[in-house]
Image (cartoon, rainbow, N blue to C red):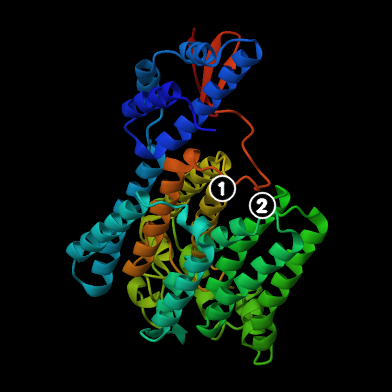
Amino acid sequence: MQQPDKIAEYLKTVSQQIRWKKAQPVILEEIEGHLTDQRNAYLRDGFAEETATDKAIAEMGDPVVVGEQLDRAHRPRPDWTLLALTGTMLILGIVLQTFVNSAVEGEWLLERQVIWAGIAFIVMTAAYFADFTVIGKYPKIVFSILWAVTILFSFFTEEINGRASNMTYPLLLFPTAFAGFTYSMRNKGYFGLMLCGAAFLVPAYLSLIMPSLTTLFIMSVSCLIILTAAVLKGWFGTKRLPAMLIIYIPTAVVLSIPFIISIGTGYRAMRLKTLLNPSSDPMGAGFMVSLINRILSHSRFIGGGSPLEVFGVTEITQILPEINTDFMLTYLTHRFGWIVLIGIIVLFSAFIFRAAVLCKKQKSVLGFLTSTAIVSTFAMQSIVYIASNLGFLLFSPLSLPLISSGWKYIITNMLLIGFMLSVFRTGTLVKDKADAALVNTKRFIKYNNGQIIINLKSNLHMKMRI
């Protein structure tokens, strides 16, 4: 039924006061719903339609006042804590990379680090203002494009330690795309759950042909977190135990394949053995573990570590390889003390914790899944890198996000952070489709005992007494 002209005029006046265009449809829909409900209530009480409409509008209040109040309360607000932590990590990365590269190459490369950091910041800003809901609206297209880009990167890649390194960067974006695909499968039962598993096989296969077990591990954990959260919240409409078995048994099989294959050659088995007991092969597979442990044992809590000699070499920059990429934290710990490592761990823990808290507050399924995918990808990169620099080398380190050298990793992670901040900026306006298993049952605007209660956020209510 077409809404009366007076209600349409009221909504138009309210919308003129709200400067954030993205918020207007959500707010106006709720106000229209409330006006219609109140008008219908008066119609049931025997009032004429025009009188019922006038009384409903009068109860709502002056449209200019209502619009101005909504405009002040409903604006896109960046999370300044996360932005500050991101800026701190980016600046710290510039400083540390410049210092470490000067130790390796003998010259300060500040200009280069600043340029790449500036480009990464632009990428993050673009992602911040992007509409993250695109991965939920067009999940198959996004997934296919990302798959095609990864394949394309494989033709223009360089091999580092036998690994097609350029394929790693787009693969780190797959968990986020997987979140959108999972969102599109909600309420489709076990069939939708199995389709999600089939979708995961695409990036899993690409990581195996690189090959990169680290990338496979990071993607697997991130996607498992997404699916586990979806199952526990009942978004597939399945029973928990059978759904968990469907998720975890095939994943365990996929992850075990490269280990089973490599056991035939003995390398992976030897690496696992030397991880547990580096002295069993100190000059072979256990060399790096033994070397890192020795360097860390010569480190102090604050200040430079005590000298050590390896093969007649005493200069730490010549003893420890890849200090500007894979083993920066090991070098910095020996150079400045454990306090540096502890400080970096605290910084990353604060970022991950704050992001996880904001993820939990997301009202929409899509916002929750997307932000969870990005946080888990960021967290797993950090955990693997820090563990490797402490001598746990079951998986090779990829990147310490925004800190370790590698401009492609910095840009990729800044893109993810910007996309996550976009979720936190506009996620409160995202509404899941009507068939979603999880819906927000709280009305945005309610009428109760002579009060209009506008539920702007879970922790913010604005009351206007009539």
Horizontal and vertical percent for residue 9? 38, 24
Q: Nearer the viewer, residue 171 or 5?
A: 5
Horizontal and vertical percent for residue 303? 36, 53
Task: Give the CA separation, mark 2 to mark 1.
Answer: 9 Å
In the image, taking residue 205 as reference, residue 197 lies left or right, namely right
Name which of mark 2 and mark 1 comes first in the sequence.
2
The residue drawn where x is 60% and y is 58% is 184
Image vertical order of residue 424 relative to residue 92, above or below:
above
Horizontal and vertical percent for residue 273? 66, 78
Identify the image quadrant of residue 285.
bottom right
The residue drawn where x is 45% and y is 81% is 151
> What is the three-letter code of the residue carrying label 2?
Ala
Number of marks drawn: 2
Horizontal and vertical percent for residue 395? 56, 72
- Quadrant in which the N terminus is drawn: top right
Provide the residue designation for mark 2. Answer: 229
- What secondary structure is found at the residue carrying circle 1? helix
The residue drawn where x is 41% and y is 29% is 74
Q: Nearer the viewer, residue 71 or 374?
A: 71
- What secondary structure is found at the residue carrying circle 2? helix
